Amino acid sequence: MNKSLVLASLLAAVALAACGKKEEMPAAAAGAAASAAAAVSTAASAVAGAADTAASAVGGAASAVAGMADAAASAASK
């Protein structure tokens, strides 16, 4: 009986909490959220730029290695 009473009261508390009025976010918190979103966007752009730079560097290094391999092959065949 006691468990049923406790369970019923918990269920009633959850139901009342779910029906409560939801408060809107204060303007300062909304501004902070917008600033955080802008910072994330800027960081993502910076990371994308760094990835492009790294990819270009890898491509350049691969070209240099291929050129050295060709030069070594030419020198070996002479």
Image: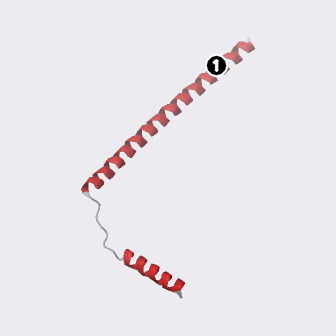
Position of residue 62 relative to residue 78, above or below, is: below
Q: Which residue is mark 1?
A: 68
Residue at the extreme bottom: 1
Please rate how many residues cluster around mark 1, counting C-alpha atoms within 10 Å: few if below 14, some from 14 to 19, many from 20: few
Quarter of the image with the N terminus is: bottom right
Asked whether 60 or 73 is in front, the reply is: 60
Give the side of residue 25 with respect to residue 15, left or right: left
Q: Residue at x 53, y 28 (%)?
A: 57
Give the side of residue 12 with respect to residue 28, left or right: right
Asked whether 70 or 61 is in front, the reply is: 61
Position of residue 70 relative to residue 44, above or below, is: above
Asked whether 33 or 74 is in front, the reply is: 33
**Secondary element at tag 1:** helix
* x and y percentages locating residue 63 in the rendered image: 58, 25
Q: Residue at x 74, y 14 (%)?
A: 76
* x and y percentages locating residue 41 in the rendered image: 38, 45
Q: Residue at x 37, y 78 (%)?
A: 16
